């Protein structure tokens, strides 16, 4: 089993913000992980993060890869505390979004609740 | 014949925002050329500066004439507008300089590197907060979500920013305005797509938008930005106001209030106040060894 190290600062730069940049990392990761490879995301030198980047790069892996597989085959290194915090929130949200078929219904039902209160 | 409108003193309470919105709505619906007179204005906060920039651009994009009568500016306001670059940008004169003002800024597109540079070097790391690079990254990470929301959801041609440091209060202010469609519009369009027929009032639309994980965009798990920002403001004793359509929200460490008022603005304006005391800030924990997924 091969391990691929992806250096985020080299691929994206020191600011990881947009969906577009996240999508580039997602494509590379998805290819590796669906071929039973292992990937290490190295965030050394990356300073600023935003949730759309993590949603695209990592969150959407949960669409068709099991969490246990991701825990075994995807490692994150040198991620700053604020990056870690943002990533954890994104993963929790993505697990609900992709893992629970009723999640999107629950978002809509919240609208219903608000419409009845309106 | 030109019609004169008087710019009032504008602070940053909800009633001040209402005054701005009423002025804007009167101006954009007027048929004649407009002159803005500042003789009745004793103070303009950054929200007013960002908003006036957006007003000027809106009028220009609608091929309407708007003249600023700079001769009516009080000296201290003129100095502030010169310092933050607004006079240079709108009037084409006076080179800005560094002071307690944070430069006025217009963004035509989401250039994230440029916005991050602005937040870090023009707003945060000017020596008025003894701030570590790690905290600067943390604050910037949270605030950049404002711009992502403005560009992705507003359908606005531009985003307008201004800020200020207030030494007596030891506070930093940032105001970001877009003149797009507004959050309630996006939520109602989303409701239409769900074919549920729900009727959502503007204040409830804002409340929904600030819930973690709610998004009007499909395709992947989204909708984290406003929730992350809200949490950051609460934990770090800042405050946030957001105005869109006839509703607004105010958030601080003690409360989160969603309200409507008797005025309306079609876009969205976000106003953030942060404390300049680094000891108030709580940094997230280091990367733990627990399972990520």
Image (tube, coloured by chain):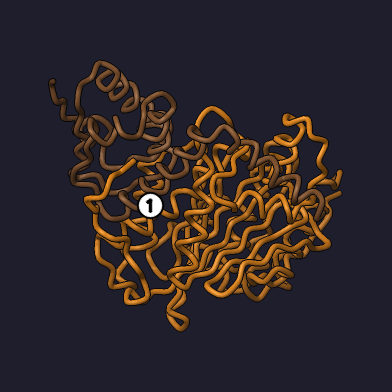
Chain colours: A brown, B orange
- Residue corresponding to mark 1: B141
Q: Is residue A27 above or below residue B70?
A: above
- Which chain contains the residue that carries disc 1? B
Q: Secondary structure at mark 1?
A: helix
Query: B179 left or right of A37?
Result: right
Residue at 60 percent across and 62 percent down: it is: B47
Q: Nearer the viewer, residue A2 or A53?
A: A2
Q: Nearer the viewer, residue A70 or A83?
A: A70
Image location of residue B62, percent across then percent down: 73, 36
Q: Is residue B128 above or below residue B186?
A: below
Q: Nearer the viewer, residue B21 or B98?
A: B21
Q: Is residue B253 above or below residue B52?
A: below
Most distant residue in the left direction: A2
Q: Is residue A5 above or below residue B96?
A: above
Q: Quadrant of residue A54?
A: top left
Query: B226 left or right of A6?
Result: right
Q: Residues within 10 Å of mark 1 (few under 14, many from 20)?
A: many
């Amino acid at each position: 089993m091969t391990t691929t190290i992806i250096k985020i600062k080299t691929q994206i730069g020191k600011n990881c913000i947009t969906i577009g940049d996240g999508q580039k990392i997602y494509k590379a990761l998805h290819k590796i992980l669906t071929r039973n490879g292992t990937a290490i995301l190295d965030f050394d030198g990356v300073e600023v993060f935003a949730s759309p980047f993590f949603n695209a790069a990592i969150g959407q892996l949960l669409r068709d890869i099991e969490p246990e597989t991701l825990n075994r085959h995807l490692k994150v290194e040198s991620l700053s505390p604020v990056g870690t915090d943002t990533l954890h929130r994104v993963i929790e949200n993505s697990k609900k979004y992709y893992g629970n078929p009723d999640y999107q219904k629950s978002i809509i039902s919240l609208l219903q609740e608000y419409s009845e209160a309106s | 014949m030109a019609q004169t409108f008087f710019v009032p003193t504008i602070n940053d309470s909800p009633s001040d925002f209402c005054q701005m919105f009423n002025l804007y709505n009167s101006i954009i619906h007027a048929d004649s050329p407009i002159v803005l007179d500042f003789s009745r204005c004793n103070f303009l906060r950054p929200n007013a500066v960002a908003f006036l920039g957006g007003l000027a651009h809106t009028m220009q994009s609608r091929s309407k004439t708007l003249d600023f009568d700079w001769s009516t500016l009080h000296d201290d306001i003129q100095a502030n507008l010169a310092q933050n670059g607004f006079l240079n940008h709108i009037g084409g004169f006076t080179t800005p300089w560094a002071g307690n003002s944070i430069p006025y800024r217009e963004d035509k597109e989401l250039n994230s590197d440029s916005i991050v540079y602005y937040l870090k070097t023009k707003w945060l790391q000017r020596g008025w907060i003894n701030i570590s690079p790690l905290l600067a990254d943390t604050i910037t990470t949270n605030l950049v979500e404002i711009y992502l929301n403005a560009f992705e959801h507003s359908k606005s041609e531009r985003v307008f920013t201004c800020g200020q440091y207030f030494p007596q209060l030891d506070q930093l202010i940032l105001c970001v305005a877009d003149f797009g469609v507004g959050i309630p519009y996006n939520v109602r369009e989303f409701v239409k797509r769900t074919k549920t027929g729900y009727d959502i009032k503007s204040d409830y639309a804002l409340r929904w938008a600030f819930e973690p994980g709610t998004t009007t965009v499909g395709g992947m798990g989204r909708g984290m930005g406003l929730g992350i920002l809200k949490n950051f403001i609460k934990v770090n004793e800042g405050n946030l106001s957001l105005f869109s359509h006839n509703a607004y929200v105010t958030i601080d460490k003690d409360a989160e209030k969603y309200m409507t008022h008797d005025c309306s603005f079609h876009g969205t304006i976000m106003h953030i106040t942060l404390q300049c005391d680094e000891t108030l800030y709580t940094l997230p924990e280091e990367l733990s060894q627990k399972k990520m997924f």
